[in-house]
């Protein structure tokens, strides 16, 4: 059957960019999203309901040829219900894994993918025992629902122990070695249900306060093959369909996997202008059963997130090679409201243009 | 005032591609379009009404910060009404000129832009007198409402005279010299209301049965500067804002202007993937008062129109460098339902990929 409509759980900027990339392919988007002012709503049919509303999910199934999501914290109940009624990509098993840092790291380890040493923590006693193995500093993370640095605490000494438990609340946690990495990078790959797999060039990422600020496309990165080998194992193990992102720490001893996101990823937004085929289009192609497109980079490219508010549109667009991406969201402290992609002919030009953009960003 | 909503008269594929290019810029589209299944409707707010419905136009004015159109045959009444209420770009004067081949060619001549010799025809007698000047063959065209080769007839001998008058009906016409051109080309330019002007590389175009089939981006074309000089005179004369296309015949004696289109143009569809900034984005930038983007080509690129029906999506997307553009329209003989853009690293590769696409087109 020829896929014509793609249902998306969630209606944020990832859904918006997925929807925009689908229309030229002849794919219409339908979102299931409770927020009435969802930023994907202007470019998709909008079913306004909670993610676990059975009737809304039935409507989504009835109006979609295939279903996907833009975030990994889809309620279990929803994933099962949808998968029982309709083709759902990526496979719900990928959600289950990525929703729990312990399952995730256990899978990585089983697949021979190196990770920082980790220990489960369900009590203060577990934490103290874990710290004996990791030493200081170490990182305590909630197993579930963490994102953008939320639900994490660095423990630098004994005094930090109780503060870290307050921060992570009553959740189950894992304690990890603090990794003295040289770079944070990510690899984004797409796999079709026939097993065809493509990889984007590694992205080099800079976070601040736990939020991604800057992502740069690398060329012929020495870690490219190592990262591809890691993500390929995950894709094949899960019989994955769609785009998958894997965040990695680069250390002198090799790459360590941090976490995966079974969806399009913020560190791949530069692929819209920077690659022959964007991560959004390749995700839509994959879930619609279409051949994947080339992931080749078209030249030096990087992306800056707009956090809190958009920079002045006229000033940004006056900079050669700058591409403005306004998600149509209301400004709010700490909120991702858009991004700016910058293309250039060579690295020095890229650096110059990025510097000009940075000066315009309210919070860069 | 910061422009956030762009009203578009018309809801076809040009409106659809304008709308898609606007969202990243933070611009929402509203279309005024009578067809309930308008192909721009899934990506825009849709006011379903005739183009001259006063109440609908009021709604369009109330919901838009600025108004534009996707076709030049906007009713006079509508153009005047809208312009009296709201900022309208391109200027309605450009519509008036382009709606009538006689006004158009008169303007071109006044601006020193060479055109094929032409004569007005309001009767059989005018036609016979005109043919004495042009000789055979000559081309009779209705002054108004011609597009895609409709309302045109080539007159090769005396027997063709009455047939041509039947074909063009009771309309006022112009009779033109038949131009033995070597190439059909077009130049597309964008001008902002501050007078900033950018030009795309010339497009080399191939028509069949009056319909554009194929358009190819040229590099350093020897006619580039000549064409830029022509279109620049029109842009400045009309204090133009937005994208303007000028179709030209290349002849051994120089370029001759055929007609202009005060809007984005089919021969510029390759700019979506082929240029740093597409014609659609530059039109939206211009009407929203934003700085224009670079028109530089990113490499060899060409476009094939899909006439009547779309080619098989899977087969097209399996060809490297192919970009699929389905307008979401029902198949119908002679109808433009989509286009395929092909990018490549060099000309030979482009030719090879184009040939592979042509084999998949139902009517190429």
Image (cartoon, coloured by chain):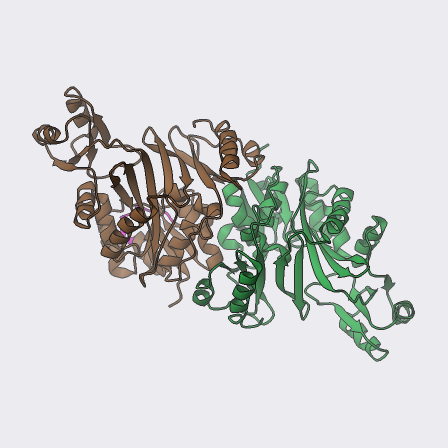
Chain colours: A green, B brown
Residue B157 placement, left or right of A112: left
Using the rendered image of the protein, determine whether residue B44 is visible from the camera's viewpoint. Answer: no
Q: Quadrant of residue B4?
A: bottom left
The chief SS type of the magenta part is: loop
Residue A354 placement, left or right of A318: right
Q: The N terminus of chain A appears in which quarter of the rendering? A: top right
- Give the x, y percent position of residue B308: 42, 30
Q: The C terminus of chain A appears in which quarter of the rendering? A: bottom right
Q: Residue furthest top?
A: B159
- In the image, residue A250 sits, relative to residue B171, either above or below, namely below
Residue B88 placement, left or right of A222: left
Q: Is residue B49 magenta?
A: yes
Q: Residue furthest bottom?
A: A159
- Residue at the spot x=84%, y=77% of the render? A157
In front: B58, or A124?
A124
In front: B25, or B265?
B265
In front: A360, or A261?
A360
- In the image, residue A226 sits, relative to residue B153, either above or below, namely below
- Give the x, y percent position of residue B198: 36, 55
Which residues fall within the magenta stretch? B47-55
């Amino acid at each position: 059957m020829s896929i014509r409509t793609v249902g998306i759980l969630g209606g944020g900027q990832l859904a918006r960019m997925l929807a925009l990339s689908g229309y030229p392919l002849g794919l219409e988007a339908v979102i299931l999203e409770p927020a009435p002012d969802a930023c994907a709503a202007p470019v998709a049919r909008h079913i306004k309901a909670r993610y676990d509303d059975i009737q809304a999910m039935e409507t989504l199934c009835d109006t979609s040829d295939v279903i996907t999501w833009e975030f990994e914290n889809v309620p279990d109940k929803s994933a099962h219900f949808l998968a029982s009624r309709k083709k759902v990509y990526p496979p719900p098993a990928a959600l289950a894994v990525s929703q729990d840092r312990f399952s995730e790291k256990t899978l990585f380890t089983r697949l021979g993918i190196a990770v920082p040493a980790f220990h489960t923590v369900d009590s203060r006693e577990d934490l103290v025992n874990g710290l004996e193995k990791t030493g200081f500093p170490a990182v305590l993370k909630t197993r579930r629902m963490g994102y953008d640095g939320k639900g994490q605490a660095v423990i630098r000494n004994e005094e930090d122990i109780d503060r870290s438990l307050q921060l992570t609340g009553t959740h189950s946690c894992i304690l990890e070695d603090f990794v003295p990495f040289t770079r944070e990078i990510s690899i984004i790959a797409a796999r079709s249900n026939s097993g065809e797999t493509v990889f984007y060039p590694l992205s080099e990422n800079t976070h601040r306060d736990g939020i991604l600020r800057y992502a740069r496309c690398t060329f012929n990165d020495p870690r490219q093959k190592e990262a591809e080998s890691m993500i390929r194992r995950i894709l094949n193990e899960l019989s994955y369909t769609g785009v998958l992102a894997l965040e990695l720490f680069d250390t002198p001893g090799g790459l360590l996997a941090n976490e995966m996101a079974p969806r399009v990823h913020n560190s791949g937004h530069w692929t819209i202008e920077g690659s022959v085929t964007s991560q959004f289009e390749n995700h839509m192609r994959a879930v619609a059963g279409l051949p994947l497109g080339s992931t080749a980079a078209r030249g030096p490219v990087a992306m800056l997130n707009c956090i809190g508010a958009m920079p002045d549109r006229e000033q940004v667009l006056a900079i050669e090679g700058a591409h403005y991406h306004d998600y149509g969201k209301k400004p709010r402290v700490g909120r991702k409201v858009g991004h700016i992609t910058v293309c250039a002919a060579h690295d020095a030009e890229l650096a110059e243009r990025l510097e000009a953009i940075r000066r315009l960003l309210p919070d860069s």
